[in-house]
Amino acid sequence: MPLARFMELALYHPEHGYYTRADRPIGRAGDFYTSVSVGRLFGELLARRFATWLDRLAGPVQIVEAGAHDGRLAADLLVALDRIAPALRSRTEYWILEPLARRREGQVQTLAAWANRVRWFADWRDIAIPVQGVIFGNELLDAMPVHRWSWDAARGGWRAIGVGLDGDRFTWVPLARPGDGATHPEFPAELADVLPDGYVIETSPAAESWWHAAAKALQRGWLLAIDYGHDTPDRWSPARTGGTFRGYRGHRESPDPLAHPGEQDLTAHVDFGAIRRAGEQAGLQTEVFCSQEQFLTTVLSELSRDAAAMAAWSAPERRQLMTLLHPQHFGRAFRVLVQQR
């Protein structure tokens, strides 16, 4: 089967999928950290940026979060937003796009205090009115299914690589044809003579399609992704001849990402060049593409005018900030794409 189908089953199967099982915490006791697991400061900084944006819009507005995990980021955002911009409270709704029923159940419990201000939707088709406000996802696109390709230097073309079964072990196999919706990677023609045989790369039609749908749903406002990945020029790095598809378990990279499906996180770097083009094709303008460090530093530069707010930060909150910004932690590992209409 195509890798995209394998990922879909391993991550999202209703009963056995990694993200649908209840015993998959994020943080120290789980398999990976996110900026949210660092502490509440990440949500506060996002709230400050969102408040600045929403102030520019008149009438009812929405903050739409896709892939809200356990709802902690939503709670951090709502707490901070009510404190920072109380005038927005009466005209702002928080919408969560969550197709997984088990995830929704946990989010409802986490966000019980805001029950009258939070709404849930399974997908874009359930949202009847255009969005005016902010649509965002934090570490969303990297978990969307990808197709795997290997360069055949002798033939001068791409081979689709999927997942097969060798005895009781999953293994990589060439596919006679790629999966539905998969097209071979586009790349600069001059690379054809220098790409090493067997060079591996991934494509994600699912991520591009999701972003295009989000862009179309946005009547006015901002569409934002925070994730790890690369822009088009960095995509063809000689340091990544084996691609970026990885498995993680217990905060360690798995020696075999195809082993133990449903019991380890599966991920691949986001092709932000393709994502940016998908938004622009839907009429959005790209406002910024930068590191998380650069994005949050811009928020901090505005916050520096409020000396009292920064002085009130505790020592743990200052350590949170260092983790979010430091190049060796999350500062440069994560990229931020902002597009607007």
Image (cartoon, rainbow, N blue to C red):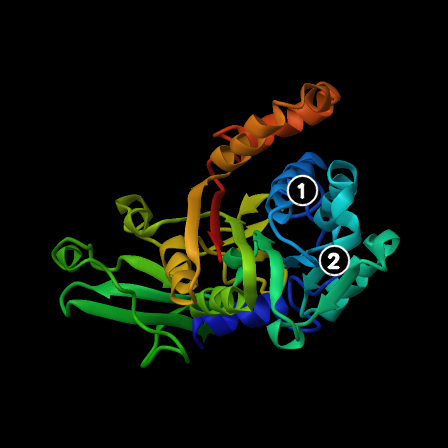
Is residue 14 depicted above or below 110 in this figure? below
State how far apart marks 2 and 1 are (Cα): 13 Å
Q: Secondary structure at mark 2?
A: strand
Q: Amino acid at mark 2?
A: Glu
In this orientation, which residue lies closer to the viewer: 207 or 24? Answer: 207
In this orientation, which residue lies closer to the viewer: 123 or 298? Answer: 298
Give the left or right position of residue 62, taking residue 4 as reference.
right
Q: Residue at x 73, y 40 (%)?
A: 85
Q: Position of residue 139 (x, y in %)?
A: 56, 52
Q: Position of residue 30 (x, y in %)?
A: 68, 47
Q: What residue is pinned by disc 2?
A: 93
Q: Position of residue 334 (x, y in %)?
A: 49, 42
Give the left or right position of residue 249, taking residue 186 as reference.
right
Instruction: Tell me if label 2 and label 1 are in contact, CB under 8 Å.
Output: no
Say which label, 2 or 1, has the lower sequence index.
1
Q: What residue is pinned by disc 1?
A: 47
Give the left or right position of residue 285, taking residue 267 as reference.
left
Q: Amino acid at mark 1?
A: Ala
Q: Quadrant of residue 124?
A: bottom right
Is residue 122 depicted above or below 300 in this figure? below
Res 270 seen here: no
Q: Quadrant of residue 131?
A: bottom right
Q: Residue at x 34, y 53 (%)?
A: 242
